[in-house]
Amino acid sequence: GVLVCFDIEFPEGARQIAQAGAELLLLPTALDLPDKNDHRVVPSRAVENHLFILYADLEGRAAQVPGQDLTSFAGGSRVLAPDGADLQQAGEFTGGALLVARLRLGGYGVSEERNPYLPDLRAKAALGHYAALGPDARL
């Protein structure tokens, strides 16, 4: 599946992609330095949804726009496993980096057993725990 930039800040997008059966989430982004929250949020989304995440973050300076401050993008791209661990990580302000990682699809069953978020969510929904959300709620 694919989310773009700020979409990862909200759990629902990654959750829907995982529930659709995806094992890999592509996440191109351009978070500027003041908004850099990816080091906490992205691994959380990997663990919550048992997804590999390929996080490609822009690096460098944005073009100067009259009346706006110059924005810097730090980079810090990374490849995360479903247990939230970094398989590869680029530093910040590297001048560009190519990350290569071997993904073992289906190879993180222990992580899923320790953190059964998706099966638990489905089970609770089947028991009516989320009925108050209405019939169109996506869990």
Image (spheres, grey):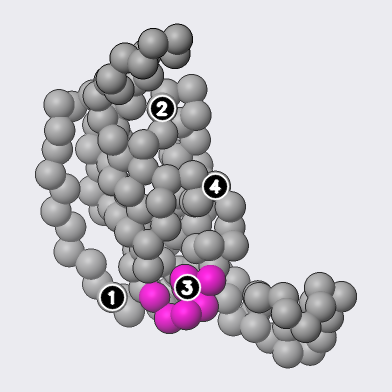
Q: Position of residue 41 (x, y in %)?
A: 51, 46
Placement of 28 over or under 81, stated as above or below:
above
The alpha-carbon separation of the residues under discs 1 and 2 comes to 31 Å
Q: Which residue is mark 4?
A: 9
Q: Nearer the viewer, residue 86 or 63?
A: 63
x%, y% of residue 24?
34, 68
The residue depicted at 36 percent of the width and 43 percent of the height is 29
> Which label lies toward us, 3 or 1?
3
Kindly state the secondary structure of the residue where label 2 is placed. loop
Which residue corresponds to mark 2?
32
Q: Give the percent coordinates (x, y) of residue 119.
A: 59, 81
Q: CA distance from mark 3 to mark 1?
A: 13 Å
**Position of 127 relative to 47 (above/below):** below
Instruction: Say which label, 2 or 3, has the lower sequence index.
Output: 3
Q: Residue at x 36, y 73 (%)?
A: 23
- Looking at the image, the residue that sits furthest to the front is 66
**At label 2, which amino acid type do we have?**
Asp
Q: Amino acid at mark 3?
A: Ala
Q: In this figure, which residue is indicated by the disc labeled 1? A: 105
